[in-house]
Image (cartoon, grey):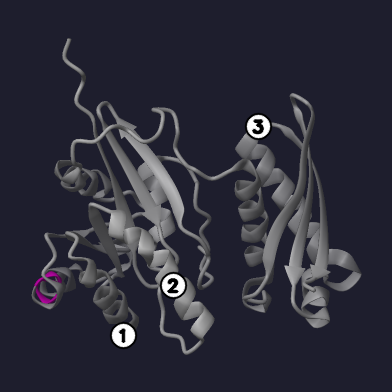
Amino acid sequence: MKTKKEYCGYIAIVGRPNVGKSTLINEIVGNEISITSKKKNTTQKNIIGIKTKKDHQFIYIDTPGIHITKKKDIKEKQDNNLKIIKNSILIIFIIDRTIWKIDDEIVFNKIKKNKIPIICVINKIDKIQNKRLILPYINFLSKKINPIEIIPISAKKRENINLLEKKIHPYLPKNNHVFSRKCITTNSLSFSISEVIRQQLMFFLRDELPSTTTVKIESLKEKTKKNLYIKAVIYVTKERQKKIVIGQKAEIIKKISMSSRFNIEKKINKKVHLLIWVKEKN
């Protein structure tokens, strides 16, 4: 009896901050597995999204945005996040419209060292008013980085997403599937909930949100099948930051808590009881 052929591979989604990497992986997978916002460095860790179509399994990696920094710890973190690329069969290099920045140059110089095929994606084409600029920019990118494909898309509007997937399809090698057919992410429930809370932090605090703020889920208890009890901690580094997150008369933290609870309930289809504390890191 012949065994059924299976195809599987890792595809890294790479680019500078805020080019639309998380939006793209969410649209491809068909579920919000990576949080999005206009704030720089929304994605802090590599997020895995899985899409299985018949005998083909596509494993997408949403990498944190790479940017210019003099901080040694951030540089090391960025390099560690990019190590996963070495196991990829394909890289999707995303650029924001027709804007080529120094950060784009830095990202490209890092990924080209791996000698892995690159598909260049020009995202947010819905925001380009003069569409005549796209073709000359494609010519510029073709000479500049020489990718295997250059595809203009709008991840938010789902424009050319199917075309992008078709271009990726032939590159999947013969491999057994790594994940079950129904699996769409490796995110744990605890991580997904912490990300929902972090997304609400970014929404309500915007530029006031300290970059070092982290969210940790201390406990998850399912007392009944329809009720989930969550205890979460928002960690900041200074007393002043703690006051910003809490707000006057606890107004901000109440909004964050209510909005987080609503979004978690929508995500897991259960009644959520959420308690959030704000603490200083020791």
Judge left or right: residue 179 versus residue 234: left
Residue range corresponding to the magenta coloring: 138-142
Q: 223 or 254, which lies in front?
A: 223
Mark 1 highlights which residue? 102
The residue under label 3 is which amino acid type? Answer: Asn
Density class for disc 2 (Cα within 10 Å; few <14, some 14-19, many ≥20) is some
Residue 140 part of the magenta segment: yes
Please say if 171 is above or below 147.
Answer: above
- Residue at disc 3, secondary structure: loop
The residue under label 1 is which amino acid type? Answer: Ile
Q: x and y percent of residue 258 in the render? A: 77, 51
Please say if 46 is above or below 166.
Answer: below
Residue 192 part of the magenta segment: no
Dot 2 or dot 3: first in sequence order is 2
Q: Is residue 17 visible?
A: no
Q: CA distance from mark 1 to mark 2?
A: 16 Å
Judge left or right: residue 214 versus residue 66: right
Majority secondary structure in the magenta region:
helix
Mark 3 highlights which residue? 269
- Residue at disc 2, secondary structure: helix
Density class for disc 1 (Cα within 10 Å; few <14, some 14-19, many ≥20) is few
Q: Is residue 199 visible?
A: yes
Q: 82 or 227, which lies in front?
A: 82
Residue contact at pointers 2 and 3, CB within 8 angstroms: no
- Residue at disc 1, secondary structure: helix
State the image quarter where residue 189 is shown: top right
Q: CA distance from mark 1 to mark 3?
A: 44 Å
Q: CA distance from mark 2 to mark 3?
A: 35 Å
Which label was assigned to residue 78?
2
* Residue at 14% across, 42% down: 170
